[in-house]
Amino acid sequence: MKEKYDVVIIGAGVAGLYAAMQFDDDVDVLVVSKKELELSNSSLAQGGVAAVLDKDHDNFKLHIADTLIAGKFKNNLSAVEKLVSEGPGDVMRLKSLGVDFDTEETGELSKTLEAGHSRHRIVHHKDSTGKAIVDKLIENVKTKKNVEMVDFSLVYEINKVEGGFWLGILKDDRLYQVGAGFVLIATGGIGRIYKYTTNSAIATGDGIALAHMLGAEIRHLSRIQFHPTAFAAENARERFLISEAVRGEGAVYLNCKGERFAFKYDERGELAPRDVVSNAVIRESIATNSEKFYLDITHKDPDFIKNRFPMIYSRCLEEGVDMTKDKIPVFPCQHYLMGGINVDINAQTNIEGLYAAGECTHTGVHGANRLASNSLLEALVYSRTAAQHMLFKLKRDGRKELASPPTPDTADGEKLPSGIRTQIREIMQDTYFVLPKPEKFNDSFEKVDAVVNKLVTGNYAITPDYIEARSIAIVAGIILDELREGINL
């Protein structure tokens, strides 16, 4: 790492990598990856990217309407219109970069249906679309001589100074200070504040916590999506997702008695938006006094299942389930975040020079609930927008002189007590999982707030464990504070 860059991007998922692709060759860019470059929530995305690519059978108005319905009409309409109208161009850019989307025999991009969509508009690569996109973006970013990527590095603080920012970065047990004119936070989700999640181990809300400590506005962090079909593995904290597309291709949701039940709760049945189906599962669980639920797609041709869902088929086999013959055990768990660092239509926060894109943000696109496969589209559209806006400012204003960095930190300090993350997860799982428990909001907030104060004011050694525990506590505290204050979900 150098001492100064024009732009520092925190996060190496689709949003961070796609943003890095946008900068001119004379703009110095640093991409900071928390773990190996290939590990991100983006790479776990299965279903695909939603985009209007067939104007004969689809149109922007339909996609906008589907997004608004799923979001309970709490979406920012301007943000949705931007997403839907600009998104197809970004999808085709991915194709031109070499992303291997599935195609029909005619050569046309294959499009599948997912819950909440009124048309087949999701383009995909088998059932591992996110990985296909991330891998190809990494390959392309590595060809850009103006972009440096560092892995196994954790940003632990961001300081605003005249002319830009100084970031504290922990790498190889050493602390570095790196300057930047602009910063893009693209750190993904918050899944690890829950006991069970589809998110990878890196999803601890670090970027949101950093933005919050810097004074950026955080909005609607309590808008959390619980996916209705995560594989119900015994005691596994990270539960692999059974994609929405499985239901889109005809799978039915069964209760412990082997009965379909979703239509009892919504006329759209299994293809209702995710929050509706998750809600139905929990209510049916209460009614049947059982958490045994299943997805059944055994009525479809085995070869079709294996070819359409090779990754899910393989993962199920590892768990002893052959989805061509067996019902898949599933249950809701934490999956996605609709709120986050508040940004405007240019992906800019309320702090000059600080941008954010992807799952860590609140663009207003998703409203109260995300429509399936709009997440990768949002990451593409708004990360590109952020990069373009930074480029515009660089060309208009030139590079500004960066003030001296603050006094450097030392990594030394007290050892972090064990059990903090477990405590936070148990509180969140008990207080706010699918069906909130308002009677517990105040007490839970006070417990978490005490942990936050302890971590922020204490003299703890700066380690990955400390940074992630602090992030988890701060994020959980913001969520519970919103809930107890009665902020409209």
Image (tube, rainbow, N blue to C red):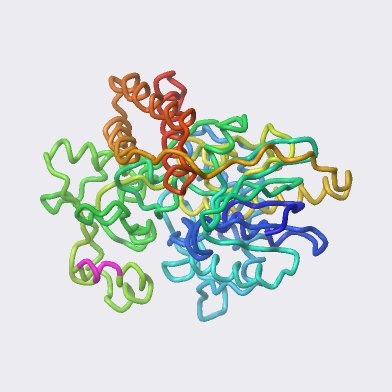
Image spot of residue 245 (x, y percent): 39, 60
Q: Residue at x 53, y 71 (%)?
A: 101
Residue 211 left/right relative to 25? left
Image spot of residue 240 (x, y percent): 33, 58
Image spot of residue 7 (x, y percent): 72, 51
Residue 177 left/right relative to 483? right
Using the image as rendered, state which of residue 82 and residue 1 is in the foreground. 1
**Range of residues picked out in magenta:** 315-319
Residue 363 left/right relative to 163? left
Residue 151 position (above or below residue 221): below
Q: Quadrant of residue 19?
A: bottom right
Magenta residues, dominant SS class: helix
Q: Is residue 483 visible?
A: yes
Q: Quadrant of the C terminus?
A: top left
Residue 48 position (above or below residue 398): below
Image spot of residue 73 (x, y percent): 51, 33
